[in-house]
Image (spheres, rainbow, N blue to C red):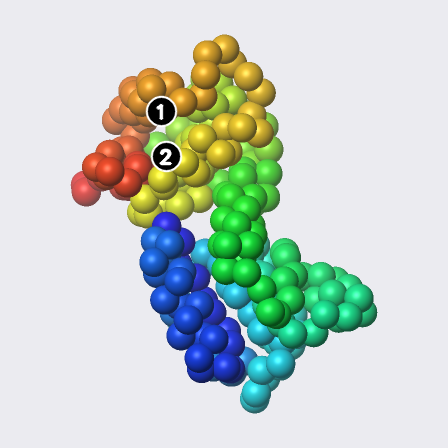
Amino acid sequence: MAHLLIVEDDELLRDGLCAQLVHAGHSVSSASDGAQAQSLLESTRFDGVVLDLGLPVVDGITVLIWIRQRLAALPVLILTARDGVEDRVQGLNAGADDYLTKPFEMAELLARLQAMLRRSRLPAFGGSLEVQSSTSKNLRLDPVLPLGWLGEEAMELTHREWSLLSLLVNNMGQVVGREDVLAVWQTAPQEGGAAGSNALEVYVHRLRRKLNDSGLSIRNVRGLGYMLESDTP
């Protein structure tokens, strides 16, 4: 599940997109012009943006450049009727993660969004990962290498443990679905054994032991996935 912002001035299309994305399990907010989108982005945390280019008040390219200056890692998919090569090049050079032209198939949009969100959760796409805990043992993870520290003490992490923990840290306080973890594991070096749901339970158990007395805990959200949260002091 992700919180998405849909920026589209066509009311019928905007309402249809919102309904389809909610049906797909996402939380959705919308804006009908670029200025409204900027206001929402300043006040609300989003996991991704679907952005039209032909917007009133503030055009889409200006909004995209504005996003990249303030929210460099926020995934943005351009959805527009502009299908020229120069338009695509301009959008991608301005910082879009993907570009889809209208008319489009909803199944393709959903697949592109899912791929974009999955890529954004990979540790290598983020910066330095650090979580303040309710104790002095703050958790810090290297964004590229399978290394981690609790306070000043190094953690022994396998590649799967590190990628799982990085995903949880990147989504602190939010549910991370099992399918998201398994998708990230597809990019990780093999450690022996299938990367399935049973293996996931084992790795979660291992991480819980390694986070013992850290002030952080991994909560099982039944039927949805897992959430990293800070224990109440």
Which label belongs to residue 178? Answer: 2
Q: Position of residue 231 (x, y in %)?
A: 22, 39
From this view, report whether residue 94 is shown above or below residue 73: below
From this view, report whether residue 1 is shown above or below residue 50: above
Q: Quadrant of residue 70?
A: bottom right
Q: How many marks?
A: 2
N-terminal label among 2 and 1: 2
Q: What residue is drawn where x is 46% and y is 12%? A: 193
Q: What residue is drawn where x is 63% and y is 62%? A: 100
Mark 1 and mark 2 in contact (Cβ < 8 Å)? yes
Q: Quadrant of residue 3?
A: bottom left
Q: What residue is drawn where x is 50% and y is 11%? A: 192
Looking at the image, can residue 204 be seen? yes
**Image position of 229 (left or right of 152):** left
Looking at the image, can residue 41 be seen? no
Cα distance between the residues tagged 2 and 1: 7 Å
Q: What residue is drawn where x is 72% and y is 70%? A: 83
**Residue pushed farthest left?**
233
Q: Position of residue 17 (x, y in %)?
A: 44, 68
**Residue pushed farthest bottom?**
57
Q: Position of residue 174 (x, y in %)?
A: 33, 47
Mark 1 — residue?
A: 197
The 10 Å Cα crowd at callout 1, few under 14, some 14 to 19, many 20 or more, is: few
From this view, report whether residue 1 is shown above or below residue 38: above
Q: Amino acid at mark 2?
A: Arg
Quarter holding the C terminus is top left
Front-lying residue, 212 or 134:
212
The 10 Å Cα crowd at callout 2, few under 14, some 14 to 19, many 20 or more, is: some
